[in-house]
Amino acid sequence: MADEFDVYHLPDDDALFRAAAEHAARDLDPADPANARYYEWLARDARARQTPAERTETAARAEDFAQRWAVRHQAARLRVTLASGAPAFATGARSISVRESVSAGRRTGRVPAFDVRAAAGTGREIWDEACDQWIVRPDELPPGDYLALRVSGDSMTPLLHDGDTIVLRIGGEASPETVVVARLPDDGYVVKKVARADADFLELESLNDAYSSRSVPRRDAAVLGTVVMRWCVHEA
C-alpha cells in the first residue's frame, strides 16, 4: 500500500481523505516504519488543504514540537529531570550559610536555593554565603544533599535557559554525559556538560555551539555538584 502513494494521487475528495485519516487512526501503527509513506502522504495532503495562514501555524507548531522533543531526549540522555513553571518555595526558613543549609535540607526535605547565578563570574565562594530561601524537595528526588541555583546566560540552550532554576546533587563523581556546576578560576561558577574525564582534568562543553569548551582540574573543589532537575518558566 505504501508504495502506491508514490505513483497515484487520490482524487481531491474530502470524504475520501476523511476516510483515509480515520483508517490511519484506527488500523495503522504510526511507529511502524512500514506505514511511514502512508503517513507522509496523509500529512502532505492535509497540508495542501490548508490556507496559507493555517500552514504557517502548522509549521510553527511542528517546530515547537520538534524543539520540545529534542530537549526531552537530551535531558534523558544527560539524566536531568524536567519540570515546567516555578518550583514550590518553602516558607518560614531562617537565614543560615549555604554549607549549613545543605545539611539542614537533608533532614527537613527541603532544598536551599541560592541567589548567585551559576554562570556569574563573581569569584564568590558559595558555601559561606547566607541562604534564606528554600524549595520543597520534589518527590522525584531521593533524600540527599542538594542545592538550587539560577542559570545565567544561554550557553546551555536549548536544555537550560537564562533564569531557569536547577537542582544540584552535591558530591559524587562527575562523569561524562552529565551536567555539572563547576568553578572556573577566572569565571566563577558555570553550568556545563562533562564531555570527557581523564585522571587529571574534566573537559566541559556548552550545548550552545557558539561557546567553546573549557577544562578544570579533576578535584573535589572544582565541581560543586551534578544537575539532576530543571524548572523552566518558558514552558509554564
Image: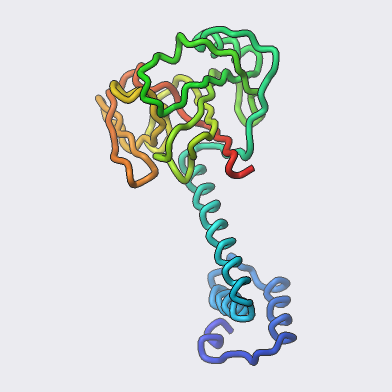
Name the residue at 29% across, 26% down: 216
Side of 63 relative to 198 (left or right): right
Percent from the top left, x then y, of residue 103? 55, 10
Name the residue at 56% across, 7% down: 96
Q: Is residue 130 visible?
A: yes
Name above or below for residue 152 compared with residue 135. below
Percent from the top left, x then y, of residue 163? 52, 34
What colour scheme governs how the chains and residues are painted in the rendered image of this protein?
rainbow
Specify the quadrant of the image occupied by residue 119.
Answer: top left
Percent from the top left, x then y, of residue 189? 39, 24
Percent from the top left, x then y, of residue 104? 59, 10
Name above or below for residue 216 compared with residue 59. above
Question: Residue pushed farthest front?
Answer: 53
Q: Quadrant of the C terminus?
A: top right
Name the residue at 45% across, 12% down: 127
Q: Is residue 220 visible?
A: no
